[in-house]
Amino acid sequence: MSRGDRWLLVLALGLAAVGLVMVYSSSAILGITRYQDPNHFFGRQLIRVALGVVVMLACARVKLRWIERLAPWLLAGAVALLGALEVAGHVSHGAARWLRMGFLSLQPTDLARLATVVFLAWWFKRWPPAERGFLRGLLPPLAIGGAVSGLILLQPNLSSAGLLAATCLLVSFLAGSRLRHLAMPVAAAAVVVTVALATHPYMMGRLRAFIGSWQGGTADARGSGWQLDQSLIAIGSGGWLGRGLGNGLQKYLFLPEAHTDFIFSILGEEMGFLGATALLMLFALLLWRGMRAAARASDPFAYLLAGGLTLQIGLYALANLGVATGLMPTTGLPLPFVSYGGSALLANMAAAGVLYQVSVTHDASEARTRRPWRETA
């Protein structure tokens, strides 16, 4: 790891370390109540972080040319796993999002969102949309990305499907697509979201609770807005410095999913405004270094790959933070690197490793450019 932007690795490890601490703090009470073990969730997350470090370091050493060659096959494998969910998916909370393989559980959505970004970077390098137009350059890859989003929506998982569709549009924009061409897929996505909300009452209930919290000053605290109400109580009670690490009250079974979707609320309660700001700064630095690696990449595939992965992490973080603070309707999206979970953590650690490899490739090309000048001098 002598070349490249090591901050990409350090920041990912720092966020994962914060996640370990907060997972233990937010899940100890739930572990005692449900499993009679305060370390139940922490022990599992520790193993996942260790595995994530291995995955990140492995991806940091994989050459980009190999990732590029495997791009169509990675997407095909991800689509096959998403299809398997419809047949053998494990149902939890009314959604089939997990594949059980012995003692392991895999969420194919996390693999699919990475594979889709890799595929789009592979496609747009060969067929730039600015040169081939809408029908030949933009429509085919967006149709494939839309099909993957559709498979995710069938689970049902509207939030992940929507973020994947947004990622596809952003990668298309980075590839040089015209805004008027992107307007048509945006309109189609809006129609799909409307139909999904109309056919899934619990999604519509969350949206109504969100709208009610803004229009009528109530979040339906006794019904679908319970999580949002408790989340805002947690964040608001933290003040400037927080109650102190481990001293939060909302994790005493008041706030559901405190160690997953709403882990930021517990962090805000225990670490206060300053602790929450520090976490946001870590995310901002990671996103900056990721876009910096993308901007310095000389190869179109590396540029689009780094840009897409960075924007995807940013979208997930923005969505989770928006939900926790009441700026977006409640969804089931984890906070990247921080929330309890296996598949999402491994996917994000792999993305950090790939971003490092992009920066390594850039630095290596710069070194080759400088070497002849030095020899001449």
Image: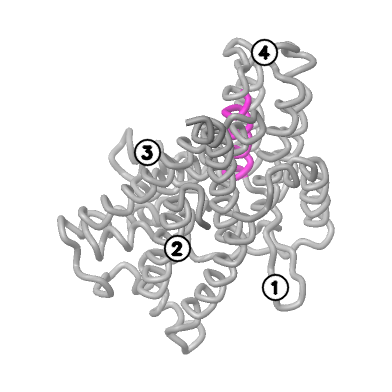
Place of residue 14 in the rendered image (x, y in percent of width and height, measured from the top left): 39, 61
Query: Mark 4 or mark 3, which is nearer to you?
Result: 4
Q: Which residues are magenta?
A: 158-172
Vertical position of residue 177 compared to residue 39: above or below: above
How many marks overall? 4
Residue picked out by circle 1: 104
Residue picked out by circle 3: 212
Left-right relation of 50 to 74: left
| Residue plotted at (82% across, 56% down) | 84
Place of residue 99 in the rendered image (x, y in percent of width and height, measured from the top left): 74, 64
Residue picked out by circle 4: 130
Amino acid carrying mark 2 in the image: Ala
Q: CA distance from mark 3 to mark 1?
A: 40 Å
The quarter holding residue 69 reads top right
Question: Dot 4 lies on which element?
Answer: helix
Vertical position of residue 315 compared to residue 266: above or below: above
Residue picked out by circle 2: 16
Residue found at the very far bottom of the displayed protein: 36
Q: Nearer the viewer, residue 116 or 188?
A: 116
Q: Residues within 10 Å of mark 3 (few under 14, many from 20)?
A: some
Closer to the chain start, of discs 4 and 3, is 4
Q: CA distance from mark 4 to mark 2?
A: 39 Å
| Residue plotted at (42% across, 51% down) | 7
Vertical position of residue 247 compared to residue 216: above or below: below
Q: Which mark is residue 231?
A: none
Q: Is residue 171 magenta?
A: yes
Kindly check if marks 4 and 2 are in contact, taking CB atoms under 8 A apart as contact.
no
